[in-house]
Structure formats: C-alpha cells, structure tokens
Amino acid sequence: MAIEREVILDFYTGNVLWIDMSTKSTRVEPLNMEWAERYIGGKGLLFRYMWEYVPPKVDPWAPENPVFLMSGPFAGTNVSTASRLVVGAKSPATNILNDSYVGGSFAPEMKFAGYDAIIVTGKADELTVVTIRDDVVEFRPGKRYAGLPTSEIESAMRNDFDKDCKTLSIGPAGETLLPWACLSTDQYHKAGRGGHGALFGSKNLKAIAVHGTGSVTVGDAPAFLADMKRIHDEFVLTDDNLWAHEEGTPVLVDLVNGAGALPTNNWSAGFFEGAKNINSESFQKIRLKKRACYQCAIACRNFHGTTFKGEEVRGEGPEYETIALLGANCGIGDIDALMKTNELCDELGMDTISTGAVIGLAMDMTEKGIADFGVRFGEVDAYAKLPTLIANKEGVGAELALGVRALCKKYNVPELSMEAKGMEMPGYDPRGSFGMSIAYSTSDRGGCHMRTYPVGDEILSGDMPNDTMDGKVERILDGNAANGFIGQNFSSIKFCGIWCDFWAVTPEQISQMLKHVWNKEFSEAEIMQMGERVWNLGRLFNLREGVEPDTLPKALYAESGAHTSGPSAGKSIGEAQFATSTQNYYSFRGWDENGVPSEAKLAELGVDVRL
Ligand code: SF4
C-alpha cells in the first residue's frame, strides 16, 4: 500500500511510520517536532515516544507493547559514527525500558525511505515480513523464512524483495521467544540486549526490509560539509580514537584481566589464566580485514577467520564483552571455540553477553552438583553445542533458555544470579572496578556498561584508583569525554545523536554539530542538561512501570564476596559503602531516598511529563 507522508525537514524526515501487525495496516504521522527539539532524537526521543505510547504496566509480551526503531538527526549524513539505530521497548527480560543500539546501515536507509522512526504494534496471525520501499509498505507471508538464520534471511530479502534493501531481522532464537534474542542487521550488527528479537518474534515479525531512494537534507550544505570535514580532521581521526581502528575492543582483555575485573568461571574469579589465548594479540593473528558501519571513519570492526573442528569460521567480532562472557566466564580460552559460539549466536540471533552468562552459570551449577547440564568450565565440545540447544529450547537448552535469574530461582541458588534488574551483567567485575557497582545498580536498563564507564579512569587510563569509591559517584552522573570518565548524563545526550561509543566526542563537539540542526549555539552546560533531562525521563518511565530497587548481587559488593586470588583479591566495596554510595547518587541527582526525582529537579530540567 502507498501512504501519505508529510514534508521533509532538514536533518529530520518529519515522518513516523506506524505498523500494526494485527490488522496489517500502516499509517504515517508527523514527527513531534516539539519533542524533537526537547529530546533531539535517538535515546531521548525514544523515551518520550515510549512514555506516550507504551501502555502503563503493559505486559511486555502483549501485542500492545510497541517496538520503536528510532534514528538520530545525523543518520544518513556524513557525520562519522552517527548513522546508528536505537531499538526501544519495554523489555521482556527486565520489565523496564530497554534502548539497544546497532550500527550497520539500517537507520540511514530508513531515513532515505522517508522515516525518522518506525513503531511496530500488534501481532500478526502468522510469521510475516514487512517490506518498505519509500511510501510502499507491504506485508508478506513469512512462513517460507521460518527458522532461517540471520545471514540467510538477509540474503533472502535481497533476492525476493530488493537487491539493495537493508534488513532488520530475527533468527531462530527470536522465533522461539528466547528472552535475550536480539535483532540483527548487516549480518554482524546486533541490537543485542533486552530481548527485542523476542518481541519481534512475539509479533510474528521475522524481518523488516527497507529500501529508500530519497536523501537527508542538511540546510546550508556547503557550510555543513565544510564544518563536518573540520570536525572529522580535528576530532575523529585522532590518536584518541585510533585504538578502536587498530585493535578494537579486544584490547580490553589484558587490561581488565590485569585489574582483576574479568568475569571468570561464572564470576567466581576476576582473573583468567587463559586470557592470553583470547586477547587482542591472539585475535590480530586471525584478523582478515577491517570493516565499518555506514559513514564511519573509525572503522573499528574486525573481521576474523579460523577453523573449528575442521570447519571454516569467519565473521566480525567477537567484541570484548563476548570474549569476557562467552570466553573467560565459561573458562574458555580456546579462540577457535569462541569464534564458533560467537558465530552461532550471530546466526541464531541471540545476545552473546546473556548467552555467556547462562552457559557460565550452567557450568557452575554442574561443577557444584546443583544440576547436571553436561558441561563444565573450559569444556569445549559441550560448550559449542549449547547456543543451538538454547535457541531452539532443546535438551538442556530448554531450561537454560529461562535465563540466569529464572534458572537460579528454579534451583533456589539466588547467590549465583549474576544480573541486575534481570539483565545479565557484562564484562567488568566491580570487585576490580569499584565504580562499576553503582554504574550497574543505577543503569536505566539493568546490568549495563554503556550508561557510564568508570572503567575508563579506573583501569584504562588509571587516573583514578579502581579500589575506592572516592569521587566516583559525582562522575557517574556528570563525567564526559573531556574529563575522561563517561557519565550517565553525557552518554544520554551522546545516544540522542546517536554517536558511537568509540568516538570520544565531547560536549563542545556535540554543540558544534547540533548547531547545524537547530541553528543556535548550545553551551556545554546546556548539552549536559539535555542528557540529564533524558536520564530523568527514563527514570520516570521505569518508576511508572514498577522498577526494582537499585542493587546488585551481594557477592559483587559485600565483604564476604571478595575474591580469594588474583589482582583484586580481598577487595570489596563493602555493604555500608555500597548503601551510602547509592544514597549519595540519589542526592546528587536531586532524587529522594527512594530514587524518585523531585518536582524541582524535573522543572529545572524541563522534563515535560510527570508520574
Ligand atoms: S566505531 Fe565501529 S561500531 Fe562505531 S560506528 Fe564506527 S564501525 Fe560502527
């Protein structure tokens, strides 16, 4: 069906495409430009749309729970790293908001087709594929694509729909509603966390394929292009960002391991002897080439090739978090086996962090005699079979597909449940990076390292000691790339952009770019306040949905949980300090002792909704 669209604006298309899977109908509404001015795009605009259109207390699995695909104002332009997509929804894994970011080239294609955002609601009566070519949106029977891995559904869309289309799809894990199934695009790029793939599956939506023939207008194009060239030369192609191109995230393995913060054997240690076999040096030996997302000058993606049991394994990644959770946390120091499980997770469409967490837990429970999942730390053969069993919910995979929290509950071992708010935690043990304790406990989507990154100062630069909370809580709020410690407010405005984590962009540089969008100057304080506004809006959403208390597994902060060996041996934040730090965090935020933002704070920030 062809649909009516509004006029095209500079940087924004001005259109939101609504897709109702139940009625197989679509409509286009104008982008709310008042919200866009207040919340910019990406994370901020997503949260404002979620506040408005997610029915309060909705069951995440219900057809009424929308999935939002949101771009930023610079997607489709030549601003480096900013053509990313954010996928948002109320998560079936955590029951709170989840915003998950993915590179590749889906977001620019969506804008070339004429949409800043796509919002999917309802549930189709059978597996369905949605195709979009500019203003023509079609619902196609998807039964023939059932069970296809992510690479094959993408090539099927190129064959059956449009050879130049970009596809956002689920693999078998999304079809079986695995709570940590992810969305995949350009084969290796994943909106990994929070189960958005499971939500596509719950709507019987196998894939959205889009091809746009339009463009993004940028106002005064010569001035914009000249300024972006200057910004690229001065701020992107610099030593600060070169590490991402030359080594990428595997460079973190030795650094984090050296600090005793590498989750090992289901978080029972912070140092992994076998890390030397899965570190950056090891991956560089099997690197075949570098790749990049749309219009990214950094090009951090490593394409590797090896063999596992005589079969060729080739693909992008694994990134550090995968190495940490699918590798060290499972006691796996075999680079070929790790490449294989990473490939399986990619093709099955499942998050590698959560998969590694649950496999590590299965190994731990087997070692301790709590249950027998037929796999122990470091055992390669059984390990390499598990992603397929979990995605298809077969054999022991049927139980493991419950996820870490539900599995620990079933076997009454809450002390082994290494998650925050139901989200399995990524690759930094707070016992070797104290700041990560409050980073995880206060993250707006559960256990996550991408909202604030104390690791930057505590381990990478070493500017702050990793075994004290002194001066950390303020920085968790307010840190930015200019002072070397990414804070929650700054990451919030950065993800409105949506600039990639791997560009160490500063508030000043963000201001220089946003000036072209809104034709006005923003001070650094205003930029940071925009981020704080977004963070508080997210908090209101989570409070509305009944968010759990901000805490962590006790082992990660209590004195009794300290490691007994390795660089972080004997170190713990301590129960009293963890509690004090949480209250200090609330106080710095202008929230009450229960973590509720005050009216004065919301008014000061210009948040335009209330509980
Ligand atoms: S730095 Fe890497 S992940 Fe980020 S946009 Fe560029 S290629 Fe993609």
Image (cartoon, grey):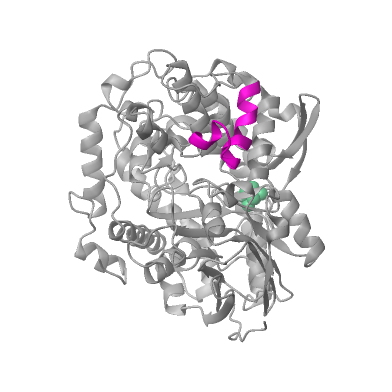
Please report the bounds of the magenta region as a residue range.
381-400
User: Residue 189: within the magenta?
Assistant: no
Residue 304 drawn above or below residue 3:
above
Left or right of 420, for residue 131:
right
Residue 8 visible somewhere in the drawing: yes
Q: Residue furthest top?
A: 565
Residue 104 lies, in percent from the top left, at: 67, 55
Residue 73 appears in which quarter of the rendering?
bottom right
Left or right of 323, for residue 463:
left
Viewer-closest of 185 and 390: 390
Residue 477 drawn above or below residue 458:
below
Residue 334 lies, in percent from the top left, at: 66, 21
- The secondary structure making up most of the magenta span is helix
Left or right of 161, for residue 320:
left
Which corner quadrant holds the N terminus?
bottom right
Viewer-closest of 198 and 43: 198
Residue 262 visible somewhere in the drawing: no
Left or right of 347, for residue 529:
left
Residue 587 lies, in percent from the top left, at: 21, 49
Residue 255 lies, in percent from the top left, at: 53, 26
Residue 370 appears in which quarter of the rendering?
top left
Residue at 47 percent across and 74 percent down: it is 520
